[in-house]
Image: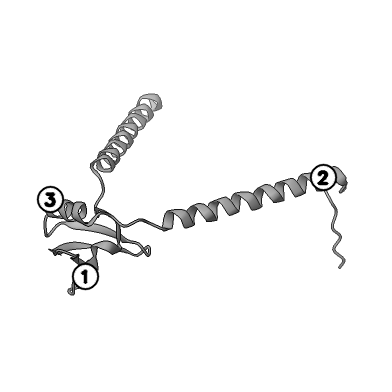
Amino acid sequence: MRFVRYRASKLNSSSLRTFRILRTMAAVLSLMLVSNSIAWAAGTPLDPVKLKQTLTQRGIGKAVKVKELDGTIVIGVLTGIHDESLEITPSKTVQAITIQYAQISAVHNSGMSTGAKVGIGIVIGAAAFCMVIVVWAAKAFSK
């Protein structure tokens, strides 16, 4: 059996030029995406005094999400606040990890924000309301 390939259209100089333009645009866009992700990966260290104040206000025993300068993310419970470092006990482990303030680029709550929780509640409520309307309409029009 012989396979024959047919072109949908003939290749000419204008179609090759269009192909080159598209290929160049794809290369530029991929380069931009890679450079953007590299720029976001590199963080700057936080001020140790402000970081210690923030963590003290949050309190020991609260869940935190810490991003280090090298991109490592540690999620766990804050178990100690010291002058130059903090201790976090990650989930599903017993031993605490000590992280220097100079190595931290971001600290967040480990759970969802209040806005996210409200949004989820609104979506669930709207879905339930739509289901009630659909069931009511199906019963009303089936008679």
In the rendered image, residue 98, in percent from the top left (x then y), is placed at 21, 70
Tell me if residue 141 comes above or below residue 51 in the rendering. Answer: above
3D distance between C-alphas at marks 3 and 1: 19 Å
Q: Which mark is residue 15?
A: 2
Tell me if residue 42 comes above or below residue 12 in the rendering. Answer: below
- Residue in view at x 60 percent, y 49 percent: 29
Of callouts 3 and 2, which one flags the residue occurring earlier in the amino acid sequence?
2
- Residue in view at x 31 percent, y 33 percent: 126
| Residue beneath disc 1 | 98
In the rendered image, residue 95, in percent from the top left (x then y), is placed at 18, 74
| Residue beneath disc 3 | 57
Dividing the image into 4 quarters, which one contains the C terminus? top left
| Quadrant assignment, res 120 | top left
Amino acid type indicated by mark 1? Thr
Q: Compare residues 4 and 81 and report the one nearer the observer.
A: 81
**In the displayed structure, does residue 47 sit left or right of residue 24?**
left
User: Element type at marker 2?
Assistant: helix
**In the displayed structure, does residue 46 sit left or right of residue 82?**
right
